[in-house]
Image: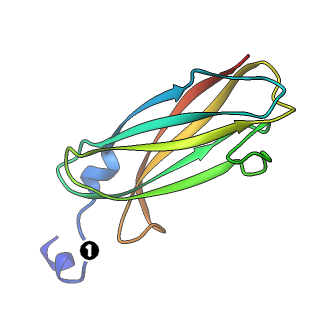
Amino acid sequence: MGLFNLFGKKDVSELVNNSPFRLATVWVPYTLQSNRNSSCALNVKIKNVMQEPLLTSIVVELPQTLGFEKNVFTKEREVRIGELMPGEEKEVNVEVFGGMKSDPGEYTVMITAMAHYRDYGHVINAVKKRTLLKVV
């Protein structure tokens, strides 16, 4: 692999085979009000558990009746965190809105943390986590 290091390539087999991140999520407040314009914040803590810096981004995907702004149109948001050093932890806050069509129940929100190579267009590995948002 020493020859590839001359050309800017590196061995990423450890990153591909192991989970590079630890994710923790918290909703503030814990519930969203149904059938009215209300919002809550999703706090995502991400920690690099690898031994090398990782270019990192997070993608949050919402169900149909929730959104990232008051008019509830946008269902997916990418947050580019930048480079996480080994053992470093960062917190990302994303505001989630409910609208007039947000019926009571539990909604699944998908969070994907991605490790990138060179730029945000090349993904080495990803960690997915589902969290539930209760609408009352």
Q: Would you call the spot at circle 1 few (<14 residues within 10 Å), some (14-19), or many (20 or more)?
A: few
The N terminus appears in which quarter of the rendering?
A: bottom left
User: As rendered, which of 120 and 71 lies closer to the eye?
Assistant: 71
Q: Quadrant of the C terminus?
A: top right
Which residue matches tag 1? 9
Look at the picture and state if 8 lies above or below 33. Answer: below
Q: Is residue 1 visible?
A: yes
For residue 6, which quarter of the picture?
Answer: bottom left
Residue 90 picture quarter: top left
Q: Is residue 19 visible?
A: no
How many tags in the picture? 1
Please tell me which residue is depicted at 34% across the width and 51% down the height of the picture. Answer: 16
Q: Position of residue 63 (x, y in %)?
A: 73, 37
In terms of depth relative to the viewer, which is nearer, 104 or 69? 69
Residue 32 versus residue 51 in the image, above or below? above
- Kindly identify the residue that appears in the image at 57 percent across and 24 percent down: 29
Tell me the residue at 73%/51% (across/down).
Answer: 74
Task: Provide residue 41's location: percent of width, then percent of height.
Answer: 56, 35
Query: SS class of the residue under badge 1?
Result: loop
> Viewer-proximal residue, 57 or 128?
57
Query: In screen coordinates, is 40 left or right of 79?
Result: right
Looking at the image, residue 103 sits to the left or right of residue 87; the answer is: right
70 shown above or below 132? below
Image coordinates of residue 72 in percent, x first then y, are 77, 45
Residue type, numbered disc 1: Lys
- In this view, the residue farthest toward the left is 2
